[in-house]
Structures are given as C-alpha cells and as structure tokens.
Amino acid sequence: MLTNNNSNKMFFLFILFFSTLISISSNSWFGCWIGLEINLLSFIPLISNSKNLLSVETSLKYFLTQSLASINFLFMILIKFSLLKNFDMNNIISIMMNSSLLMKMGSAPFHFWFPNIVEGLSWMNNFMLMTWQKISPMILLSYYFNKNFLIFMIIMNLIIGSLGGLNQTSLRKLLAFSSINNLGWMIFSIMISENLWLFYFLIYSMMIFMMISLFFLMNMYFMNQLFINNMNFFIKLNLLINFLSLGGLPPFMGFMPKWIIINFLLINKFYFLTFIFMMTSLIIIYYYIRIIYSSFMFNYFKMKWVNLLMKNNMSLINLSSFISISSMILSTFIFM
Amino acid sequence: MMKFLFMMIFMIPLCFMKNMFWLVQMMLFFMMFLFMNLNLNIMCFFNMSYMFYCDIISFGLILLSIWICSLMIMASESLFKLNFYFNFFLFNVIFLLIMLYLTFSVLNLLLFYFFFEASLIPTLLLIIGWGYQPERIQAGMYLLFYTLFGSLPLLMGIIYIFNDLNTMTIYFLKFFNMNMYLLYISMIFAFLVKMPMYFVHLWLPKAHVEAPVSGSMILAGIMLKLGGYGLLRVMIFLQEVNLKLNYIWIIISLVGGLFISMKCFCQVDMKSLIAYSSVAHMSMVIGGIMVMNYWGFIGSYILMISHGLCSSGMFCLANINYERLHSRSLYINSGMMNFMPSMSLWWFLLLSSNMAAPPSLNLLGEISLINSLVSWSNISMILLMMISFFSAGYSLYLYSYIQHGKYFQGLYSFYVGSSREYLLLFLHWFPLNMMILKVDFISIWF
C-alpha cells in the first residue's frame, strides 16, 4: 500500500463490515472463525501507516494478539468437533472458547494489549476498535458461553476497568479502560438476551462516537490539553454532558441502559454482582469528572494563541448535546 | 400540576434573552402565588393525574423550593452586574427547580429516584461554576460522591421492590410490608447521607462553604429536605424493620448533633458555622422521623420547612457581609452594628429563629420533636436538652461576635444595605415568624 488515501480505506472498511456479518451469520463454527480472520486481515491495513513508526508497531502488536486468539479459537472449535461433540454449556471447552473470544475483545484478564494499542491509534481508528470490533466476538460469545466463568470475567472487567483508569492522563487510555468496564456490562447483557445487548451497545457506541468525534475535532490526546485551549462554551457543555452521560448519571441518556441492566440483574437475583457494578461505576465517574474539570470551571488560565477552528461543525455538537439531555424523555414517546 | 411544569419549561428560553434577569425572578414569584392557590386537601393525595400528585408534604416542600429559587435569583444580583455567565446561571436555577418540583410531585418511586439524582447535576454546576475558592472542586467531589454512594443502593432497592410488588406507585406502597433488613438499609442509607446524619455529614460543611450564595441557599433550603421527604415516603412499607433498628439511627444522629453543636463554637468561618448548625437541626429531624409517631412526623416536617427558610436567610446574611468585606471570617466581621444597624435587626430576627425562640416555626418544630423523642425514651431528654441549649449558644455567639465589639480596622467604605437585600431577608423571615399564626395548616394531617 503505497499511499493511505481514502479509496484504500473505503475498500478495507467494506471488507471489515462484511467480515463481521459473515462471522455472526454463519451456520458453523468454521464460518465464524473465517469471519474473525478476515476481520483481522482487513483491520490491519486500516491502522498501519508506513510513515509512522508508532503506527507500524501498534498494528504489529494488534496482529500478534488477535492471531493468537484466533488460532486458539480454531483449535478449540476443532477439539469440540472431533473429540467432544457435546452441547453442554458448562464444561472446559466453553471456558476455552470464551477465553479466546474475550482475548479478541480486549476484556480482562486478557486486556493488557488493549490500552497499549489504543495509545498508538488515531481517534477514528480507536472508534472502530472500541465499537465495531466488539460486535462479532460478543455475538459469538452468546452462542456458547459458560455462565459461571463469564460472571467471574465480568467482575474482573469491572474492577480492572475502574481501577486501571485512575492513574492515566492520556485520554485514549482512559477511554480504553472505560471501554473495558463497559465490556463488563455488555457481557452480562448478552447473557440475558441479544436484544438487550444490542440496546446497550447502540447507546454505548453513540456516546463513544460523540465523545471521540469531539476529541478528534479538537485534536486532543492528553488531559492537560483540555486546559490550555480556548474552548467555546457549547463545546465545554457538550463535553460535560457526554462524560456525565457515559458515567450513567441521570438525567442523561447513559442512565437508561445501566438502569435496564440493573433491572435484569435484580430479576435474576445477582445481588452482590449488582453492588459491584454500582461501586465500580462510581470509581469511573470519579475519573470522568477529573477530565471535565475544565468544563465545570468557567474561567481558567487560557492561552490566547491556541485557537480552535470549529466553526463548521457546531450543528453536530449541538444536536448531540440535545439528544443526550432529552433522550430519556423522548424515549418515552417511542417505547410507550 | 402540569401547568406549573410547563410554566417552568417555558421560562427556559426567557433565561437566554437580554435583560431578562429580573423578569425570570418575577415569574417565579408569580408561579409561587399560582401554586399556593391549589385546592388543598390535607388528608389524602390530591390533584392526581398520570404521574403527578400532591400531598401535604409535597405541597409544602414544592412551595419552599419555588420560594427559595426565586430568592436565589434575588440574592445573586452581583452575577448580573458583573456579567458572569448569568444566562447559564438562570438556566441552572430553573433546571434545578424543575428537577426539584418533579422530585416532590411524581407518583412513581423510580421517577422520584431519577429526579432526586438529576437535581445533583445543577447543584454541582452551581458550586464549581460560580464558587469563589479553589477548594470548591474538592467540595463538589465530596457532594457528588457521598450522595451517589448512598443513592446507588437506593436504586437497587427500588428495582427490587418493583420486581417483588409489581408496583412503584407511592400510594400503593402502604399496603405492603417489606420485612427485610438489607432492603431497609439500602433504602434509607441514601436519605441518611442526604440529610445528613452525623457519620456521613462530611460533604455538607465543604459544599455549603464553597458554594456561592445561591448554591448555599438551595443546598440548605431544599436539598437536605429531599432526604427527609424520601424517608417519610419510604418508611411506609418499612415500618416493621424500622421498629427494630431505629435506635441506631436515632442515637447516632442525636449524639452526633450534640458533637456538631459543640463544634459550632470552634468555627471561624461564618458559613461553616451555619452549615454545622444545619447538621445539628437535621439530626433532630432524623430522630423525629425514625421514632415514627405522629408528633415526630409533624415536628420533622415543620422543622424542615422552618430550617429551610432560616438557614437560607442566614446564608444570605453571610453573603451580604461577604460582598462588602470580602471575608467570611469572624475575626474580620465584627462590630457590624456600628456600620449596618438595620442589618443587625435581620441578623437578630433570623438567628433568634435559628435558636428556636418564640414565635418562630422552629420553636413549634423543636417542641414537637422534643415531645416525640422523649415519649420514645426518657434518656433522650439529656441529649435534646444539650442540643437545644447549644443551638441557642452558638446562635447568640454568632450574633454577638458579628454585631458587637470593636470593628476591624482594615475596613474600606461600603454602603449600608440595599432595598433588594432587605426585601430578600424580609421574605425569608416573614413566613418563618408569621406562619406560626396558622400552623394547623401544616401540622394537622388528619
């Protein structure tokens, strides 16, 4: 790939979308594995940029971890076909298959590659990694999961996602740890029903999209950059609303998926697990609020020579703020 | 009921127009008078519609919240004069009022939780956005996290109740009896943190001191009462467990109230003293609700309303001094009677109400609470005696320190007191000392 222009990206993006569809709609486990491999193959050209050493190293690391997980997945599928041939969902093979899929997603305890790689990617590539790349492992997980193992993994996800982000200053790593935490919520929701997972996933990816597009337009990668530029008042408000929404505080949109998942948790009598869900989300709100200090305080030390050229994109920002605030009320018009 | 909600929603565009600062405040007064004319039926829920209702408790607290919100705008004239984001400030106040109104008037327990939490966000914005010192960040953190830590188990409890009883309408909860200890603790812990009870009260001095005057007014005026209102609603189906466990909360809050009253004597910051006195008053309110007799409920309700007016008025007074001398310290604010004798009248009236001197509503509240707590146990006489005595003590201490004595030599000139400030204090004091004349309106529930 000599140049990294848009037509190349469009080609690989197309194959990326198709690979996920192949993976989730196949009749046999081989088709799933093929979809995962094509996913990997088409994502690598999207993220590697031969002019940038960090980008090359990141794509190599991504390739190594994902291919390891894919090979593991293939091996477990073959063992299941040839040796075991059972339909029981509570045995060692389901644990191994779930582990390989969890490694694909970047969930704990196989998460160590995830913040590392997220640090090396640009914002839009991060968006693809955090949202689209999770779809096919999640749905494959729902086909054959081991409940006890996954509950243990959910707890690890929540704790690692919340405690890991406490010492970070890079915005990408913070969103990576928050993504690990939200993976915990999503794995639980996929154990309940696929519709529930779809609901959570759509709202989560919409919130992540608003956040990432805001950071992308402002070209911000680190926390100290939030304080040294002249943010417009509406941009500050949008940042505030988006982060509080992602943390799950009422009255914003992000409260609704968390509320519904807590409802299902309590219906199924997972009382202690609900407590862990809530307390880790408190820790997450703590480091989100650290990020949005700059938008709480109206007057802080601003540099005059840093200007944000965002005049053309204000309508998207205003629309996203409006959706975040009013979606709880608007949703009653849809669901009633 | 819905007409008030729409009136408030349509005041929002008014906040962003030019020169509409005083118009918004006038519209809030207007809404107050409209709301007072609702047909009131004391013994049951009235004005029920799809999701709204009004009870005697909700009615009084909604009136209090509209009153305090309109007085908040009156107190924040300096924001308007200095042009410090007053449009967004007005939006914040009206958004907070909408959330508080909805908290007190929805029928559904989960929606109550939703608006209970949602009222935290504008308060946080008020403290961190318009506060004065760098410590306000830590104060906002403490406020948010103490309250969230308490209220997330409340969400769990509410959803558990829904799964068990298949209803969340507050009216229907009186037919049930949930006899579970863990549910009891998870439901009331949120309100105890919000009230605040003694061991979980650390957020209150920080938040009250670092907030601007409007933030302090709304925190002392209404946000603490959200906890009391929640406790009053939730006790209906938790009575049996409460009878077994209430002694814990009563003892913690009464002994804590004693310690806090003694701590008030050590404070140097005026606002900090008023904040600690809020905790002491609220400790008696918690005691009254937990005892669960009729006098207890009456006393706590009256003390909630009167404390809201009184503390809010005292924060206004502290701000009046702060705007002139730019300090809240007692060392600097002394001998004010030499310069602002009319203001010392207001200091005296509000502080005498704080110490529950007749003829204020605080007196009736404290007498009812003393009755109810002593009828529960004779030993609480000692604690109540000490709390009432010390509340008189620190109120007099504050008054005497600020007004009497030699004034600070480093003062520059300031004017005595504008009519706006006198009106603000009058509107705080008038319901407090005049409602004692028609108190059966709020204290006879059947």
Image: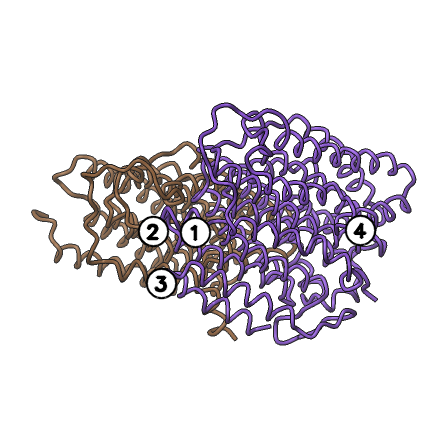
Q: Secondary structure at mark 1?
A: helix
Q: Which residue is mark 3?
A: B17
Q: Are marks 2 and 1 on the same chain?
A: yes
Image x and y of residue A328, in percent: 48, 64
Q: Position of residue B33 (x, y in %)?
A: 60, 68
Please give the label number shown on residue A84. Answer: none
Q: Residue at x 35, y 58 (%)?
A: A32
- Chain bearing mark 4: B
For the residue marked with disc 3, what is the amino acid? Answer: Met
Q: CA distance from mark 2 to mark 1?
A: 9 Å
Q: Identify the image quadrant of residue B281.
A: top right
Q: Which residue is mark 4?
A: B364
Q: Are marks 2 and 3 in contact (CB under 8 Å)?
A: no
What is the distance, in whole Å, between disc 4 and disc 1 at their CAs? 46 Å
Disc 2 and disc 1 in contact, CB within 8 angstroms: yes
Q: Amino acid at mark 4?
A: Leu
Callout 2, which amino acid? Met
